[in-house]
Image (cartoon, helix red, strand yellow):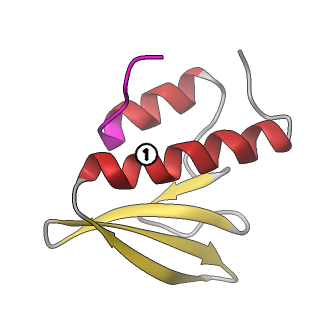
Amino acid sequence: MKEITTLAEMKAYLHKHGIEDGSVYTHGGLGGGEIDGIEEIDGVWHTYFSERGSKNGYCAWPDEASAVAYVLQRAIALAKQYRMWRD
């Protein structure tokens, strides 16, 4: 797998494997369950946990690549756990 460092690359990679925004990760919104989210706020990349209609546990990252790496590995693991991952 080529190194994925941007949100656009992450979304494309996950889409290729049958994973859409809102299923096991969310970009700036609230997902359909308890999932990780990612968004840029005032030039700073953040991750958070989407649950019960709110965003909790915000964490700021030094750059987009770091935030993407965190969410990507968790999204892949969750997709495989729920048997949503397509090779």
Q: Is residue 46 magenta?
A: no
- 47 or 19: nearer the viewer: 47
What residue is shown at x 48% (from left), y 67% (from top)? 29
Q: Amino acid at mark 1?
A: Ala
The answer to which quarter of the image holds residue 81 is: top right
Residue position marked by numbered label 1 in the rendering: 69
Q: Is residue 5 magenta?
A: yes
What residue is shown at x 49% (from left), y 72% (from top)? 48
- Residue 35, placed above or below residue 19: below
- 59 or 30: nearer the viewer: 59
Quadrant into which the C terminus falls:
top right
What residue is shown at x 22% (from left), y 55% (from top)? 63
Percent of width and height locating residue 78: 74, 47
Residue 79 horizontal side relative to residue 21, left or right: right
Report the span colored magenta: 1-8
Residue 49 horizontal side relative to residue 41, left or right: right
Percent of width and height locating residue 52: 70, 83
